[in-house]
Amino acid sequence: MHLDVVDLRNFYYRTALGRVAQRGIRERVVELWPPLPGQTVAGFGFAVPLLRPYLTEARRVIGLMPAPQGVMPWPAGEPNVSVLCEIDAWPLATGFVDRLIVMHGLETSDDPACVLQEAHRVLGPGGRVLFIVPNRIGLWARGDGTPFGHGRPYSMGQMEAELKRHGFTPERAMTALFVPPSMSRFWLRSSNFWEWMGRRAPWLAGGVLMVEASKQVFQPTRGGIGAMVRRPLRALEGLPAPAPMPRMDREKLP
């Protein structure tokens, strides 16, 4: 079940732990995808906290918020780019998006297959999608005090298998949020250190999985005229091959 947009807003924008989570994940996203001019960047679920670095460079930035969650205007004090949509009918043309971020949109959905199908549809040639989901072995998925404690947590193997099943090719995977989900001042103040440590200690389990994937595009099989040429009809088989008319016979023609 999707979380309410008011609860998500309050966590990410009105709590110290939410701001720590927002910063930790957003830094990894920008490392993967530095802002580039001319791109169309979209986010589904509640991914708008991660889209702000792209507002100035991207051609378009779109925040897709599912109907069961609700919608809020974003960004505050600027022209709104968020829109309410159905899970299985995003208001985007096929192949329209260059970069797509899905956060709090897959693990909380009642029909994750629809989310994956729509993500596959709207992604353009050469586009990439980044799925951010709770890590099944991480601390953030073990309590319901944060949004990552709701819905279905995933392991890396489960996530990659699900993406392949829906036409994606996993490209890169990593984890983030190595600080415990605690409101203690010690953990909040040392969050940058734990994020730095987590990137250098693969044995530490991050709170979220981040899996980047590309859209599989299969080469079409040749058909039509090409297939007909490979299987020509033999209607005149057995007749002598045509030969040019002798010169003398051509001169007798009227």
Image (tube, rainbow, N blue to C red):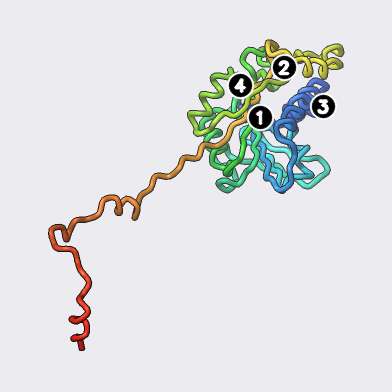
Q: Residue beneath label 1, please? A: 103
Q: Residue beneath label 4, please? A: 151
Callout 2: few (<14), some (14-19), or many (20+) C-alpha neighbours within 10 Å?
few
**Disc 3 to disc 4: CB gap under 8 Å:** no
Amino acid under label 1? Answer: Met
In the foreground, 144 or 163 = 163
Q: Residue beneath label 2, please? A: 145
Is tag 3's residue or tag 1's residue first in the polypeptide sequence?
A: 3
Q: Going by the picture, which residue comes out furthest to the bottom? A: 254
Q: Quadrant of the N terminus?
A: top right
Q: Which is in the foreground here, disc 1 or disc 2? A: 1
Q: Which mark is residue 216?
A: none
CA separation in Å, label 3 and label 2: 14 Å
Amino acid under label 4? Answer: Gly
Q: Which is in the foreground here, disc 4 or disc 1? A: 1
**Is 246 displayed left or right of 95 in the figure?**
left
Callout 3: few (<14), some (14-19), or many (20+) C-alpha neighbours within 10 Å?
few
Image coordinates for residue 208, horizontal then vertical, percent: 67, 20
In the foreground, 80 or 29 = 29
CA separation in Å, label 1 and label 2: 17 Å
Image coordinates for residue 53, horizontal then vertical, percent: 78, 37
CA separation in Å, label 4 and label 1: 12 Å
Secondary structure under tag 4 reads loop
Can residue 163 be seen in this snapshot? yes
Which picture quadrant has residue 19? Answer: top right
Is tag 1's residue or tag 2's residue first in the polypeptide sequence?
A: 1
Is tag 4's residue or tag 1's residue first in the polypeptide sequence?
A: 1
Q: Residue beneath label 3, please? A: 14
Amino acid under label 2? Answer: Gly
